Amino acid sequence: MNEAQHCPLCQNEMIWQRKTIRYEREGLPITLEGVWVRVCPACGHELVPGPLAIQLMNLADQLFRSAKQLGEETNLPMPSVHLVFPETDEVPLALLQSV
Ligand SMILES: [Zn+2]
């Protein structure tokens, strides 16, 4: 079920690791810490599984829209956002099954 994925750059077998991902949208920095991604141990290439990447972008979009509205209504400057996903012992099954 959990077929090994190979690096598109160097064909090595990729492993799962928790990584920090950063987005920047019109002056709002968003840091997501502890995201499970596939990493190539040989060349360091990182792959976020497609469904997870979409969910993370949605999350960042919603944070951005809320922060922008807050700024327009209060004149507060853009905050920085830092989310931490807690450590889990194993890669969540839904991620293992995603491509
Ligand atoms: Zn590689």
Image: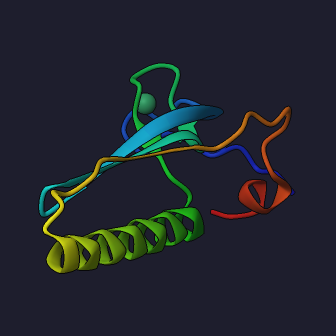
Q: Nearer the viewer, residue 12 or 49?
A: 49
Query: Residue placed at 31% from the left, 78% from the top?
Result: 65
**Residue at the extreme front:** 74
In the image, taking residue 85 as reference, residue 10 lies left or right, namely left
Q: How many marks?
A: 0
Q: Nearer the viewer, residue 97 or 37?
A: 37
Query: Residue placed at 52% from the left, 21% from the top?
Result: 41
Q: Nearer the viewer, residue 41 or 89?
A: 89
Ligand 1's image quarter is: top left
Quarter in which the C terminus is drawn: bottom right
Query: Residue placed at 30% from the left, 68% from the top?
Result: 67
Query: Residue placed at 13% from the left, 68% from the top?
Result: 75
56 up-or-down from 13: above or below: below
Quarter in which the N terminus is drawn: bottom right
In the image, taking residue 81 as reference, residue 79 lies left or right, namely left
**Residue at the extreme top:** 42
56 up-or-down from 61: above or below: above
Q: Nearer the viewer, residue 18 or 28?
A: 28
The picture places residue 16, in percent across and down from the top left corner, at 66, 35
The picture places residue 80, in percent across and down from the top left corner, at 30, 47
Q: How is the image coloured?
A: rainbow
In the image, taking residue 77 as reference, residue 31 lies left or right, namely right
The picture places residue 17, in percent across and down from the top left corner, at 62, 31
